[in-house]
Amino acid sequence: MRTVASIALDATCYGMTLFMISVGLSVMMGLMRIVNLAHGAFAMIGGYIASYASVSLGLNYAIAIPLAALCTILVALPLEVVLYRRLYANSDALTQLLLTIGITFLIIGVANYVFGPTLKKIPLPASLSGPFDIGFRMLPTHRIFVLACGCATALALWLLLERTEFGIRVRAAVDNAGMAEALGIRTSRIYLATFCIAVGLAAFGGVVGAELLPIEPYYALRYMVIFLVVVSAGGAGSIAGAFLASMLLGLADTTGKYLMPEFGEFFFYSAVILIVAIFPNGLLGREH
Amino acid sequence: MRKFAVSLTAFAACLFAGTAMAADPIRVGIVGTMSGPYALFGQNFKRGIDAWVAQNGNKVGDIPVEFIYRDEEAPNPAKSRALAQELIVKEKVQYLAGFYFTPNALAVAPLLGESKTPLIVMNAATSAIVEKSPYIVRTSFTMWQNTKPAALVAKERGAKKVAIAVSDYGPGLDAEAAFKGTFEAAGGTVVEAIRMPLATTDFSPIMQRIKDSGADTVFTFLPSGPPTLGFVKAFIDNGLKASGVKLMSTGDVVTEPDLPNIGDAGIGILSTYHYAVSHDSPENKAFIDQFVKDGGKFDEIAMTSVAAYDGARLIYKMIEATKGQRDPDAAIAAVKSMSWVSPRGPVSIDPETRHIRQNVYLRELVKVDGKLLNKEIQTFEAQPDWALSKK
């Protein structure tokens, strides 16, 4: 019983990490209808900035995170204005893939050249490192932090998209851009804002998830499959879907690793296949 | 016209003499993890070789030696094989060296006989590698070599039930077999043997499994790099250390560059290894001084630099013995039974296995003057590769 509870807890923590690093992509794919393969690259930029801020500038973790998100948005803004903007109207899938994978390679090259090929560490403050006693077992303190971040992000996003004026405009702009514009909604601004949110979330997730997915130049490619899998299993654009998918995949992976570690990723991908076979649009995805 | 022809001939003669005077350099191809998560260890290959060249010059006699580096990046046999082919065919290297990962070294072994190229393995630690070609010499270590003492120490220190957790690839399986064989022969029990996929990043479920097995000691091996740090942190953060479970490992898991990240919680971890940066000897001091003088950071010294430093010594010896000619048999014969004092301690090349014999030290993670280090507390002298040699 204790073991089961323990595994469930580990699975929740792992699932939450998956959610944190993928939710930005879910926003981008679902709301902007852009298959952004450069999501991992944005997460990586966030990680590099956080690492630079905390290692070289000696800034606090609590400052490094928002700083990383902010700077990543600033880096990504020109890309939106020059490149991404052209994709919104003409969303041919192949064009999107070629453009965003190109951006990914560019960012990998620049990161390699500027920061070197090594792993970048994001040191945790003393209050977030080490074990934390939760009664029946010890848990890494940072996992609890990720858990809290994940819940807060999910809640904030849901409120933003479902309960605010901005959310209504976003949904209107996505569903029928022409009609929304005719009604006086400035869709280009809405898209820009949503893009910034998605990129900021990518950077946030990259930094917070760095304990499990360490930051290095090939991060953007190495973990791309994980991001895409979580989003497509959850249903693009559905925050709740991404959340649910992360939890299920986390559970499959963690349980599999406990029962049969030598099977590796087998359980993770079996769960993906199963979910996508039963729900072709993802768990909570809408039909296109 | 005749005058012109004469001067042209004279000019050509000068050119010819010029090239004949400066001998063509002997090229040595180094394949190491120069980028990616394991970059630290590939860069240590280069630093070790640079240290050797700085101390001994870039010529053997009057033959210049040139080192050419290639990036193996990750366990990727196909890529390493292509790199080695390129080095042999295009760059015309006379020697190959380096190789962080076992699968990469194994992929290159079939090329050696045909191209008559000796290979000096500077890390990859699966015993069987040296058996794949008579032209392979190894200056690093093997899992059997470092693990057998670990099992003996565990038994001696009262471990009864051990859980083994190793990375699921060549060296991991070697480590598992070595520990299990030795520990059970000494009368201990192995209650759990977990093989973790190389790509594992979340070790929580593994820790739970170890906890449930009721083991009093964990023995582990993972290739040095991000996973080892993840494992040790998971061991501490999931409360295994606090509940009194002992961690026993080879030194791969507690490399010096990782110690600051493991932190004070790691104090007391025991490991067996062939090299500690803190090794107290004039040779090691000279090596480290050179390493730092060339721009290396003290906190980034890893075992691969010493293996490369000693590897460069072998390469120089081989070039000297063959006078710069491509003669792998003579080159290998020249280094068999060679013995010297390395920064890690006294070592020799076993003539039977072409693997290095060396002291293996039991080390304890301690804090001295605010710095964490692996302190050598016991020496197992002149250990061979226990899979290939019986004594």
Image (tube, coloured by chain):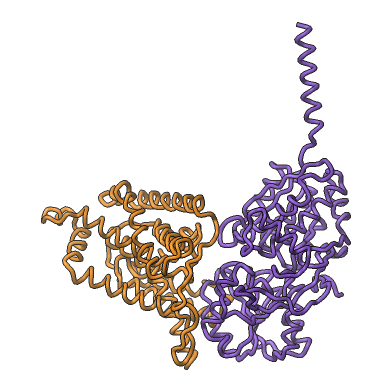
Q: Is residue A287 above or below residue B230?
A: above
Q: Looking at the image, can residue B1 be seen?
A: yes
Q: Is residue B351 left or right of residue B193?
A: right
Taking depth in this image into account, of B124 and A254 the one nearest to the observer is: B124
Residue pushed farthest top? B1
Q: Is residue B97 above or below residue B2?
A: below
Q: Quadrant of residue B279?
A: bottom right
Quadrant where the C terminus of chain A is found in the figure: bottom left
Q: Looking at the image, can residue B168 be seen?
A: no
Percent across and percent down for residue B316 are 81, 50
Which chain: purple? B
Percent across and percent down for residue A194 are 27, 60
Q: Is residue A162 left or right of residue A128?
A: left
Residue pushed farthest left? A183
Q: Quadrant of residue B21?
A: top right
Colour chain A appears in: orange
Percent across and percent down for residue A160 are 23, 69
Residue at 60% x, 91% y is: B214
Q: How many marks?
A: 0
Taking depth in this image into account, of B361 and A231 the one nearest to the observer is: B361
Percent across and percent down for residue A245 are 37, 73
Residue at 42% x, 60% y is: A49
Q: Is residue A63 left or right of residue B144?
A: left
Q: Is residue B270 above or below residue B109?
A: below
